[in-house]
Image (tube, helix red, strand yellow):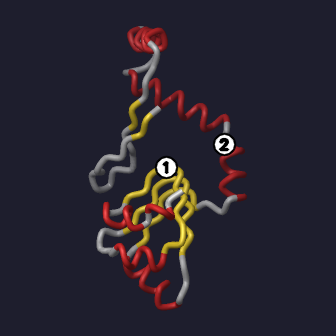
Amino acid sequence: MSVHELRRKSGDSSEKITINLGVVDLGQIDLLVQEGFYSNRTDLIRTAIRNQLVTHAEVVRETVTRKSFVLGLEHYSRENLEALQSAGEKLQIQVLGLASIADDVTPELARATIESVVVLGALHASKTVKAALADRIH
């Protein structure tokens, strides 16, 4: 499965992904859509993914707790990072969901204040900030 990051419309909290399926699997999906079980391919795929996430919800919850992940959306503003810099502190970003770094954060400020980045989901930041943090993104 390959994942592609796209520019998001403001307020949009979804990511577009591309998956490769075998022709037999795809045919079965199309059959279920044709028979009215699902409105379209995407509906079936979303439902299947949600069902798997429900099945493994306890593992996700335990791992988020054990690894101290923020679950959901986390935004880092220039003001947040400047306050950390003034206090001489560094940030370890650990997010399961969406982590975003404000567009007005400079690469220099990001490097001075962000020690490491682990995001399971999506990281939204300017290209220059991502490039500055490339060696810290895991």
Q: Secondary structure at mark 2?
A: helix
The quarter holding residue 21 reads top left
Q: Residue furthest bottom?
A: 86
Quarter of the C terminus within the rendering: bottom right
The amino acid type, in three-letter code, at marker 1 is: Gly
Q: Is residue 19 above or below residue 106?
A: above
Count of numbered labels shown in the rendering: 2
What crowding class fits label 1: few (fewer than 14 Cα within 10 Å), some (14-19), or many (20 or more)? some
Q: Residue at x 41, y 74 (%)?
A: 110
- The residue that disc 2 covers is 57
Residue 124 placement, left or right of 94: left
- The residue that disc 1 covers is 121
Q: Which mark is first along the chain, 1 or 2?
A: 2
Q: Residue furthest front?
A: 135
What crowding class fits label 2: few (fewer than 14 Cα within 10 Å), some (14-19), or many (20 or more)? few
The amino acid type, in three-letter code, at marker 2 is: Ala
Q: Residue 7, how many percent across, how many down?
A: 28, 50
The quarter holding residue 38 reads top left
Residue 11 placement, left or right of 135: left
Q: Residue at x 35, y 73 (%)?
A: 107
Q: Secondary structure at mark 1?
A: strand
Q: Residue at x 60, y 38 (%)?
A: 53
Q: Are marks 2 and 1 in contact (CB under 8 Å)?
A: no
Q: Residue at x 38, y 10 (%)?
A: 34
Q: Residue 10, how many percent across, how many down?
A: 28, 56
Q: Is residue 103 above or below residue 81?
A: above
Q: Residue 119, how many percent across, how many down?
A: 52, 56
Q: CA distance from mark 2 to mark 1?
A: 16 Å
Q: Nearer the viewer, residue 58 or 4?
A: 4
Comparing labels 2 and 1, the label whose residue is closer to the camera: 1
